[in-house]
Amino acid sequence: MLEHDLYALTAAYGPSGREDGVAEAIRSLAAPHCQRIDRDPLGNLIAYKPGASGKTLMLCAHMDQIGLMVTDVDPSGYLRVAAVGGLQPAYAIARQVAFQSGVLGTVFFGGKDKKPQEAKMEDLFIDIGAKDQAAAEAMVSIGDVAVFHAPMRVQGSLATGGALDDRLGCAVVLEALRQPCPHDLYGVFTVQEEVGTRGAGPAAYGIQPDLAIALDVTPAGDWPEAPPSPIALGKGPALKLMDGSVVVSQPVRERMAQAAQAAGIPFQREVLKAGGTDTGVISRTLTGIAAGCISFPCRYVHTPVETVDLSDAQGACIWIKAIMEGNL
């Protein structure tokens, strides 16, 4: 089911602030397994399954993906853009992108003396094949957002595509919703994580869980000349210890590690010097919430070719099941 779900979720449109398409794809997959599914005012999709323990577990993953927002249309019909989320200009050049309407375009850059790695966001444009400004404005509007047109493919145990951050986490939360759980279980699919982890805090405020676990990708260091990191694909999901937004509390770390060990799954330990996930904002909600994170090693994060090992995600499913079955 995990791979099936992942094909459906990575095919759905959903940049930050425009998550309706992917939210509806998730709703259709989650509905048979939940008592209730709601959208909050910010757009978070919240699926609920009741339990009998009197405790509440929140599992969350963000729905949104990075993109390029149209800021201007020039007289020749080319679209100027701004980044939505952490998109590096060099990774977008010579790539195909898609708008919600289905319009496709190609990203390129101006500046005859510049190399691609020197291009800045203001140098980029999208070519949608329009002959002039009027033709382009009949196809797109200022404020429309394009995402990488990069359908997922699977080879062996590796999956590659343009929205695995964090549709992989969404697929694992969906799998958890299919399992029995003694606790009240909230599967939360958050919005606007890529532009400042904006959705998770309000969701956690409303739920007030006894324990929250976020699921997200983390950069792997197992490719040539990658930034130094011991995290590698295929060696298991990772237990987040720290990133730029949170130092996970010792009791939560120990509880999660014990659950993984009891389930017999290998796991890695993740320490990031920067960046962040929904974990950080959840942990600072109310008077503080016990919050942890399971990370999926991922090569080439925030590119059209994000690459993960599905065995790590399968391990995360087993890990989450063990947490669900334990005491909160």
Image (cartoon, rainbow, N blue to C red):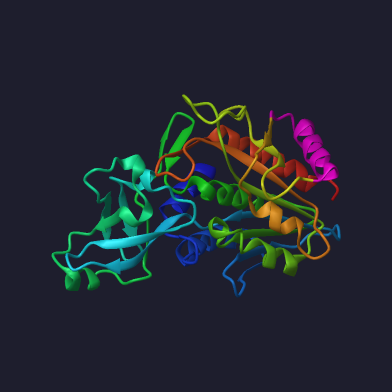
Q: Residue at x 70, y 53 (%)?
A: 280
Compare residues 134 and 304 and report the one nearer the observer.
134
Q: Single out the residue that lies furthest toward the front.
A: 113
Furthest toward the left, the residue is: 131
Can the viewer see residue 1? no
Q: Based on the displayed image, in which of its 4 quarters is residue 139 positioned? A: bottom left
Q: Residue at x 61, y 58 (%)?
A: 197
Which residue occupies the foreground of this view, 32 or 201? 201
Q: Residue at x 70, y 44 (%)?
A: 320
State the extent of the magenta-drawn residues as a range: 249-266
User: Per the image, is 188 magenta?
Assistant: no
Q: Is residue 264 within the magenta segment? A: yes
* Residue pictured at 80% horizontal, 65% vertical: 286
Above or below, 228 against 259 in this view is above
Residue 222, percent from left and from top: 53, 26
| Left or right of residue 302, residue 180 in this image | right
Q: Position of residue 283 (x, y in %)?
A: 76, 56
The answer to which quarter of the image holds residue 254 is: top right
